[in-house]
Image (cartoon, rainbow, N blue to C red):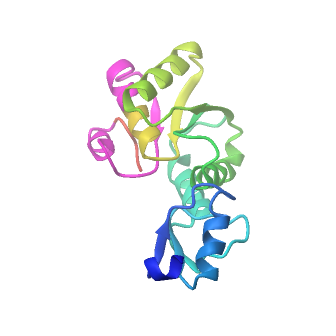
Amino acid sequence: GLGARYQGIGINMVDAQSFDAVATAAARAGVPLISFNVDDARTANARLATVGQNMPEAGRKFGEAVASRIPEGSHVLLTMHDPGITALEERAAGARAALTSHKLKWTSLITGTDREQAVVKIKAALEADRSIRVVLGTGEADTQAAGLALERHFADQGYVAGGVDTGGEIMRLVKHGTVLLT
């Protein structure tokens, strides 16, 4: 059985229900299962614990951190690299809640995880609606792509970008001022 093969399981629970059966099977076999990095906090499951960020709170803190740089009434492009991932959805909700008083217009964009395709999608969205002056990312792939799109195609045009994560070229983009913060 499962217990004879594994002493423990660690998993990213990127979907609210897809891993429930695995967690239940592990629990029945006496194998401890924890989630890390991304958790399914919205629904009950048999995982023992999670190690990771409080995603709604992280989104709220992110929204608070960028608030002073976003003028009231701005049009914001909110990006996610993939739809339906609990961590990204919760970060986005936290950021939006923190920025409610700014009376922002929100446009959402799913960028995908391919960096160059994501840059193309963000560039196209910014070209299609010139009223969008702020790009906020919820994960590594889309935050990096937002910074690269601005660096390559909209440098020194007054855009504000921020995001979540530190991978890829994000820290270089922050250092150079293309991405405000992460």
- State the residue in front, 98 or 109: 109
User: At 37% from the left edge and 26% from the top edge, which residue is drawn?
Assistant: 116
Part of the protein shown in magenta:
148-177
User: At 46% from the left edge and 34% from the top edge, which residue is drawn?
Assistant: 160
Report if residue 154 lies within the magenta region. yes
In this view, 129 is above or below 114: above
Q: In which quarter of the image is the N terminus?
A: bottom right
- State the residue in front, 26 or 116: 26
On the question of residue 24 being in view, the answer is yes
Q: Is residue 175 left or right of residue 51?
A: left
In percent of width and height, residue 121 lies at 50, 23
Q: Is residue 145 left or right of residue 11?
A: left
User: At 71% from the left edge and 47% from the top edge, which residue is drawn?
Assistant: 101
In percent of width and height, residue 52 lies at 49, 69
User: At 27% from the left edge and 38% from the top edge, which residue is drawn?
Assistant: 176
In percent of width and height, residue 168 lies at 31, 44
In this view, 153 is above or below 51: above
